[in-house]
Image: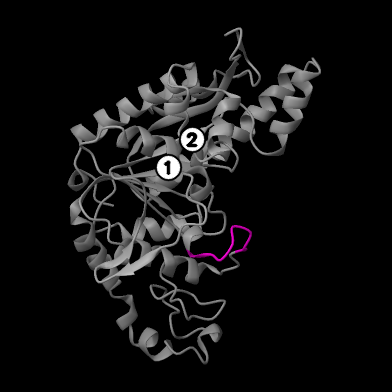
Amino acid sequence: MADVPSDAPEHCPGTSSDQAGKSSACQGCPNQNICASGAAKAPDPAIEEIRQKLTTVKHKILVLSGKGGVGKSTFSAHLSHALASDDSKEVALLDVDICGPSIPKIMGLEGEQVHQSGSGWSPVYVEDNLAVMSIGFLLSSPDDAVIWRGPKKNGMIKQFLRDVDWGEVDYLIVDTPPGTSDEHLSIVQYLSGAGIDGAVIITTPQVLGSPLLLHFAATITHEKKSSSQQKQFWEVSLQDVRKEIRFCKKVKIPIIGVIENMSGFVCPKCKNTSQIFPPTTGGAQRMCEELNLPLLGSVPLDPRIGRSCDEGKSFLTEVPDSPAAVAYQNIVQKIRDYCSSHTTSDNPV
């Protein structure tokens, strides 16, 4: 929970709970007397500090996904690259996937370190107008495991927002972990004063997680799945996306739109399109129509995207004329249009 102090015991009820300072878990906690007095229920002063710190950031966008492995970090990275392709814009990418920071590798920044200055932490720059911050820069090795409980992760996110010297920024892209967990609650709480323009939700046409591998194996061996099996796989994906949408609505984050990733495969040589994950209930477009959400676009599979990420390069500059790159650019333009017609003050959290 976002209202659990970093030095709290394991089963802390949270400072906003009626049981704060009174439950058995509170015995021996250094915050017990403060919580019991009710003083801890006051708003976290960091919220106002972050609001002031981010007054120089025009637009704040969250990138969300119901499950891992759908290309969320890949999209966050390429959204940042695309926005920064306009030299007149300053872009920042914040990786709050504390336990699985992949942004340093995708952005070609592995081995880089964060430096402290008089005005706070200095982010790492890919280009003169593209800054990145991730816990990956604070680890001694990319193989180091971050084994933290929620309160410590929340404290790190607070530091990222309050102590990083972002400077004048047009777009702050926040790459989040999959699902709806501590990190999501923290980012929403700490940005409640500064405001969030909206969230972009990443999904796939049909299957997620382990069914993805099964379906892919069946596809390449030409094994046919029954319509009921395909519909079951799709329902798994749809359920995950619905949870993410409900989360956004519950915490009052506007949804900029949905992106359907891995939407067909365009052969780089023959240019023919194959539906590796054929939607059986209308895909993301049908879902968006049912839920009255914008479908920002569909990005086809392209093996060169993965290669670019492994090499820390921008796929958009490596293969700018590919169908996937064109799809990315169209989606990014819609996000630009959304931001130009909204201000953060329109969307207080």
- Displayed quadrant of residue 209: top right
Image x and y of residue 112, in percent = 46, 57
Query: Percent position (x, y) of residue 104?
Result: 49, 50
The magenta span reads 138-145
Near-viewer residue (258 or 87): 87
Position of residue 47 measured from the top left corner of the image (x, y, whole percent): 27, 65
Tell me, for residue 2, which label it has, or none.
none
Closer-to-camera residue (109/189) = 109
For label 2, the residue is 202
Q: Are marks 2 and 1 in contact (CB under 8 Å)?
A: yes
Q: Which residue is at 37% across, 24% downward? A: 329
Mark 1 = which residue? 63
Image spot of residue 216 (x, y percent): 72, 25
Could you classify mark 2 by the number of other residues whose Cα lies within 10 Å: few (under 14), some (14-19), or many (20 or more)? many
Report the predominant secondary structure element of the magenta stretch.
loop
The magenta stretch spans residue 111: no
Identify which residue is drawn at 25% across, 71% down. Answer: 118
